[in-house]
Amino acid sequence: MASTNLDLGEELGALLAKLGQPVEQAAREMIVLELYRREVISSGKATALLGMARLDFIRRASELGIPYFRFTDDEWQAEVSESKRT
């Protein structure tokens, strides 16, 4: 397993500590969620890296404003139209 020491400085370390979880865990979650947001990794990969269930990942991403479903405007309109047919 790769390991990296990262000097966050006192101020950032203190802010992360306020999240109520170990700093390493908070940093890992932030990195994985950012990689997912940038579409570098899939939701499946993100859930595996975080060791959480997919539904928990969807909820956490949603809490942070990171969409789980990514649609273009045309795709969204097609989904809306399709849902109105049923």
Image (spheres, grey):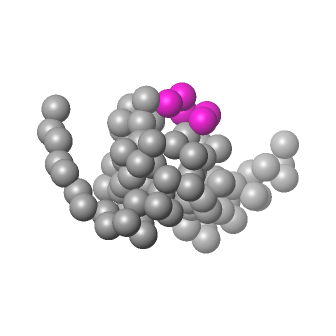
Residue 59's spot in the image, x, y percent?
Answer: 64, 44
The verdict on residue 55 being magenta is: yes
Q: Residue at x 75, y 58 (%)?
A: 80
How many discs mark residues in the rendered view? 0
Vertical arrangement, residue 83 with respect to residue 51, above or below: below
Vertical arrangement, residue 65 with respect to residue 49, above or below: below
Residue 39's spot in the image, x, y percent?
Answer: 38, 58
Residue 5's spot in the image, x, y percent?
Answer: 19, 51
Q: Can see residue 36?
A: no
5 relative position to 26: left or right = left
Q: Residue at x 60, y 59 (%)?
A: 64
Q: Residue at x 31, y 55 (%)?
A: 40
- Give the quarter of the figure containing the N terminus: top left
Vertical arrangement, residue 85 with respect to residue 14, above or below: above
Residue 52's spot in the image, x, y percent?
Answer: 50, 30
1 relative position to 86: left or right = left
Q: Residue at x 61, y 62 (%)?
A: 65
- Give the quarter of the figure containing the C terminus: top right
Between residues 32 and 37, which one lies in front from this camera angle?
Answer: 32
Between residues 26 and 53, which one lies in front from this camera angle?
Answer: 26
The verdict on residue 21 being magenta is: no
Give the magenta-colored segment's residue range: 52-56
Q: Main secondary structure of the magenta part?
A: helix
